Every structure is written in C-alpha cells, then in structure tokens.
Image (tube, rainbow, N blue to C red):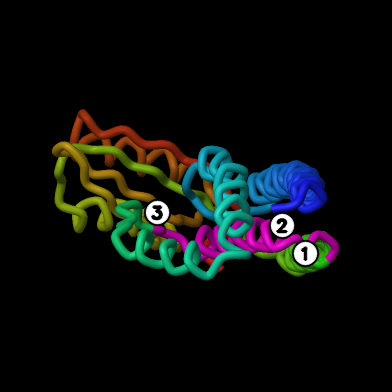
Amino acid sequence: MKFEDLLQDFGSDIVNNQHFILNALLAALLSYLLGRFYIRYGTTITNRKKFASNFMLLALSTMLIIFIVKSSIALSLGLVGALSIVRFRAAIKEPEELVYLFFVIGIGLGMGANQTTTTLLAFVLIISLLTIRHYLEKRSLMSAPENMVLNISTPVLDIHKINEVLAKYFSLVELKRLDQNQGKQFLSYVVETDKLDNIVQAKEELILLSPELDFSFVEQRNLAQ
C-alpha cells in the first residue's frame, strides 16, 4: 500500500470518528429530551422516570451497532446470527412503552446511518404532533369526571372480595394491572367517585379484609378513557 493511500485512509477514519462523536452527542441529546417528554406527557401507570432512564443507553447502543455494520455485509450477517440467540425476559406491559422504545431505536438507527438531518426533522415533527395532540385531548376532557388510580399491595387475597368492596363505593372500577411476587399481590385499579366519604369508607372496609393490606390513591384525570 502506498503512503498516499495510508494518509487517505487515516484522514477518512478521522472524518468518520468526527461524524460518530457528533451523531452520538445528538443521539444522547434527543433521547434525553424524549425521556423528559415521556415523563411529562406519558400516560402509563408504571414508573415513567425509571423507564425513561434507559432511553439514552438504548439509542447509543443502537447507533453503535449500525455505525459498525453499515459498511460490511459480513458484520451484518454476523449481527443477525448474534441477535438470534438473544432473549429478552422483561415483558412490555403497556403499548405506549413499546412505541417509545421504537422511537428511541429509530433515533439510534438514524444517527448510526448518518441521517442526521432526517432524524432531527422527524424528531421535531413527531414531538410537535404529540404535544399538539396532548393539549387538544386535555381541552376536550377538561369537563369530564376525574378518575383515580388505586394501587393495592396485599398477601394473596381473593380478588373478588376486593372488587365487591370497591363496587360498593365507586361508580367505576377497572382492574388495569395484576402482579404476584413472593407471596404478595400488586393490583392497580382505576376508580371513580365524586365523594371523599366513599374513599374513606372503602379504605376502612379494605383494611378489614386484611390488616396487612397497603394501598394508595393517586389522582389521574381520565385514565380509563
């Protein structure tokens, strides 16, 4: 190989590394902003702050993979083989979580493929549309009744008994989530009432079902819609 070819390859590596660093910084920034947006405007019951903390790592990891394999068919085939043995054990419980994960992966793909302008435009467009939709829905629901999230943690207990108590005091009772771990049940309900006394009476009757029962009421407008 000639000396001029070595210089050309070296210069090309410098340019590629500069593009990689710039795109990595942009991917980190966009994923961080998306995380803040998800925390502020997301509607899932799960811990949105903890979930959003994974966005930056996912975006940068996706970008790194695409940046490395995009110029090599052999590496691309090797990546397919490697991913075929990967199994993800964490279940996605809310469709909204899956949508945001795809959004983050899209950021990583765009930056890894050096489609910086397109990725930035798509990010601004999608965020703008989601913001507009949020405020339009908020205005249309301002006069609608408010719902509350009821989170219950208790030793294994007949769910029908809990439902019977809740049905006595709330006009709306909807079980959104049920988990069981280490001999305890974790339930998330959406309930609706316009009287504080109903909440107090429901609390007292729930405690009678099990002294070890823990629960919390969290106001959430129109979660059941």
Residue 200 covered by magenta stretch: no
Furthest residue toward top: 211
Q: Distance between the residues labelled 3 and 1?
A: 43 Å
Badge 3 vs badge 1, beta-carbon distance below 8 Å: no
- Camera-near label (3 vs 2) is 2
Q: What stretch is highlighted in magenta?
A: 92-117
Residue annotated with mark 3: 189
Badge 3 vs badge 2, beta-carbon distance below 8 Å: no
- Indicate the amino acid at tag 3: Tyr
Q: Position of residue 137 (x, y in %)?
A: 73, 67
Q: What main secondary structure does the magenta stretch of the protein show?
A: helix
Q: Where is residue 219 in the image (x, y as percent from the top left)?
A: 57, 45
Residue annotated with mark 2: 111
- The answer to whether residue 33 is visible is no
Q: Position of residue 49 (x, y in %)?
A: 57, 39
- Camera-near label (3 vs 1) is 1
Numbered disc total: 3
Badge 2 vs badge 1, beta-carbon distance below 8 Å: yes
Asked if residue 54 lies left or right of residue 94, the reply is right
Mark 2 Cα-neighbour bin, 10 Å: few <14, some 14–19, many ≥20: many
Furthest residue toward front: 2
Residue 114 covered by magenta stretch: yes
Q: Which element is circle 3 on? A: strand
Asked if residue 196 lies left or right of residue 26, the reply is left
Q: Which of marks 3 and 1 is nearer the N terminus?
A: 1
Mark 3 Cα-neighbour bin, 10 Å: few <14, some 14–19, many ≥20: many
Q: Nearer the viewer, residue 150 or 40?
A: 40
Residue annotated with mark 1: 115
* Residue at the (81%, 67%) spot, across then down: 118
- Indicate the amino acid at tag 2: Met
- The answer to whether residue 223 is visible is yes
* Residue at the (77%, 53%) spot, across then down: 5
